């Protein structure tokens, strides 16, 4: 895919990994659409950085768990650019949920944002891509989908669902639209982790470091630029942690 002037929506792109992905794509000439839910100021700051790196972005607001918000955001993008070439489903909830403390509300939050949000994004934007007969979708999953973290059970289950969606939609949207997943490990460790806990995790990684947002962004770039014959794939970015 030629990134120059390609229109790409990155969800949750006001901060952290989402912003790094958006910046990497912008530097290649892509027309970025920044998405945020509640962090308006973060999105504004990201828009300024992206405009300095490339083309001025469009900023859209929405709750990814709501179908109507996806339809509205898609309509805004089409009204502005007339097409949508790429989607990166990055927005997600992540926090510790000990088994005995998980509430029904928490379970629903993880499934609604992390899984249902990816589904509605893929379906809404994917249908437009099918009409265009071209497009790229990249879903951000997690190694927790494979090696379930017992203290993060709803999160792990939601990300396992993202991998299942990726495989199913890759078949459904072929041959014109590719659907792939990035499966990150320890990328930009959560601020809630203590120093001792962080160091213990790093000792388990063969490359002996945590990953950076740029490590993940580079994998996304590869799927957009060089992924013409790749669909339904799961690309692991974890420094070798899951090889045992």
Image: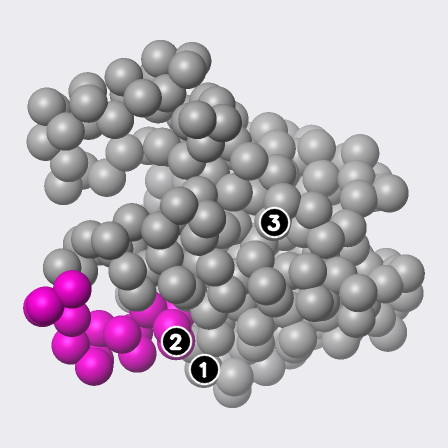
Quarter of the image holding residue 71?
bottom right
Residue at coordinates 38% horizontally, 73% vertically from top-left? 111
Residue at coordinates 59% horizontally, 29% vertically from top-left? 218
Residue at coordinates 61% horizontally, 38% vertically from top-left? 235
Q: Nearer the viewer, residue 102 or 105?
A: 102
Magenta region:
99-113
Residue ID for mark 1: 66
Residue at coordinates 86% horizontally, 74% vertically from top-left? 131
Q: How many tags in the picture?
A: 3
Left/right placement of residue 209 relative to residue 145 reads left
Query: Where does the image place residue 136, in percent across and percent down from the top left?
Result: 74, 53
Residue ID for mark 2: 112
**Residue 168 shown in magenta:** no
Q: Counting residues from the N terminus, which is met first, the one under dot 3 or under dot 2? A: 2
Label 1 sits on a secondary structure element that is loop
Q: Quadrant of the N terminus?
A: top right
Residue 62 in view: no
Residue ID for mark 3: 181
Q: Which residue, as the protein is rendered here, is positioned at the far bottom? A: 68
Left/right placement of residue 237 relative to residue 38 reads right
Q: Which mark is residue 50?
A: none
Q: Is residue 190 above or below residue 175?
A: above
State how far apart marks 3 and 2 are (Cα).
Answer: 19 Å
Are the two marked residues, 3 and 1, in contact with CB atoms closer than 8 angstroms? no
Quarter of the image holding residue 100?
bottom left
Between disc 2 and disc 1, the foreground one is 2
Label 3 sits on a secondary structure element that is strand
Residue 110 in view: yes
Q: Nearer the viewer, residue 77 or 142?
A: 142
Query: Where does the image place residue 51, in percent across and percent down from the top left?
Result: 54, 40
């Amino acid at each position: 895919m030629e990134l120059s002037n390609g229109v790409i929506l990155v969800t949750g792109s006001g901060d952290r990994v989402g912003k790094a992905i958006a910046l990497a794509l912008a530097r290649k000439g892509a027309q970025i659409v920044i998405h945020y839910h509640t962090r308006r100021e973060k999105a504004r700051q990201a828009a300024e950085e992206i405009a300095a790196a490339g083309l001025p972005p469009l900023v859209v607001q929405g709750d990814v768990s709501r179908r109507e918000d996806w339809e509205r955001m898609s309509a805004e993008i089409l009204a502005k650019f007339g097409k949508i070439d790429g989607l990166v489903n990055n927005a997600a909830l992540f926090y510790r949920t000990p088994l005995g403390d998980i509430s029904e509300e928490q379970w629903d939050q993880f499934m609604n944002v992390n899984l249902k949000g990816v589904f509605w994004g893929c379906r809404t934007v994917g249908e437009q891509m099918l009409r265009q007969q071209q497009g790229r979708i990249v879903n951000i999953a997690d190694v927790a989908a494979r090696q379930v973290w017992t203290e993060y059970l709803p999160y792990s289950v939601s990300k396992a669902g993202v991998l299942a969606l990726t495989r199913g939609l890759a078949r459904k949207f072929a041959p014109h639209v590719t659907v792939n997943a990035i499966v990150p490990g320890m990328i930009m460790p959560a601020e809630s982790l203590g120093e001792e806990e962080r160091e213990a995790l790093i000792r388990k990684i063969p490359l002996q470091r945590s990953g950076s947002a740029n490590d993940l962004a580079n994998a996304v770039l590869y799927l957009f630029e060089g992924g013409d014959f790749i669909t339904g794939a799961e690309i692991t970015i974890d420094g070798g942690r899951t090889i045992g």
